[in-house]
Amino acid sequence: MTKVDFYTGSSDKLRTACQLCHKAMQHGLKTVVSLPDEASLDAMDKLLWQYPDIAFIPHARSRDAEADKVPVVLSCSDETFPHYDMLISLHDECMPFFSRFERVAEIVGMEDSQLGRERFKFYRDRGYELRHFDLNRTHP
């Protein structure tokens, strides 16, 4: 069954998605980033070329021919993906295809916490294993 991680309190959801893509890639997970529109897809594409400063995250758009050869795939309208290890969702609602993935990362911004709580309740009510990571929490 799909495992769902919530990352709350993100001040920059695209940058948080980049961090999660980088971490997933380091662990050998292939990742799909699902974005709400073309403008956010373009912004994420551009950011992945710059993040992190000392590394490179190979990525493609889901409709690109090389999508099945890279660890990170960006999508805003397709529901056909070359792999199903991890889904990073930047949507305000649960994606209907989320259960195809082994892991789902839901990123919740500071301004959309109520929508995040609704998604959390959706998954919890259906029995999915949930974990929560508060990005605002300071570590000693």
Image (spheres, helix red, strand yellow):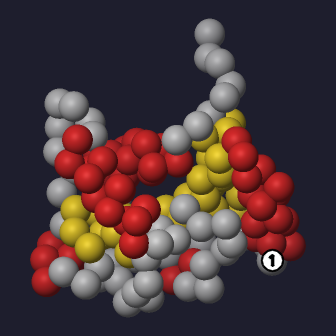
For label 1, the crowd category at 10 Å Cα-Cα, with few meaning under 14, some 14 to 19 and many 20 or more, is few
Residue 82 percent across, percent down from the top left: 29, 82
Q: Which residue is nearer to you in this view: 20 or 61? A: 61
Relative to residue 30, is residue 123 drawn left or right?
right
Relative to residue 26, is residue 122 drawn left or right?
right
Q: Which residue is nearer to you in this view: 30 or 32? A: 32
Residue 22 percent across, percent down from the top left: 33, 46
Residue 18 percent across, percent down from the top left: 38, 47
Q: Residue furthest front?
A: 39
Q: Amino acid at mark 1?
A: Arg
In this rendering, the count of numbered labels is: 1
Relative to residue 77, is residue 69 drawn left or right?
left
Taking 77 as reference, is 131 above or below it? above
Taking 15 as reference, is 58 above or below it? below
Would residue 6 be visible to someone looking at this image? Answer: yes
Residue appearing at x 21%, y 31% in the figure: 53
Residue appearing at x 70%, y 42% in the figure: 110
Residue 49 percent across, percent down from the top left: 20, 48
**Image quadrant in which you'd find residue 85:** bottom left
Does dot 1 land on a helix, a strand or a loop? loop
Taking 51 as reference, is 131 above or below it? below
User: For the N terminus, which image quadrant?
Assistant: bottom right
Residue appearing at x 34%, y 69% in the figure: 74
Would residue 8 be visible to someone looking at this image? Answer: no
Q: Which residue is mark 1?
A: 126
**Image quadrant in which you'd find residue 95:** bottom right
**Image quadrant in which you'd find residue 84:** bottom left
Q: Which residue is nearer to you in this view: 73 or 139? A: 73
Residue appearing at x 35%, y 56% in the figure: 43
User: For the C terminus, which image quadrant?
Assistant: top right
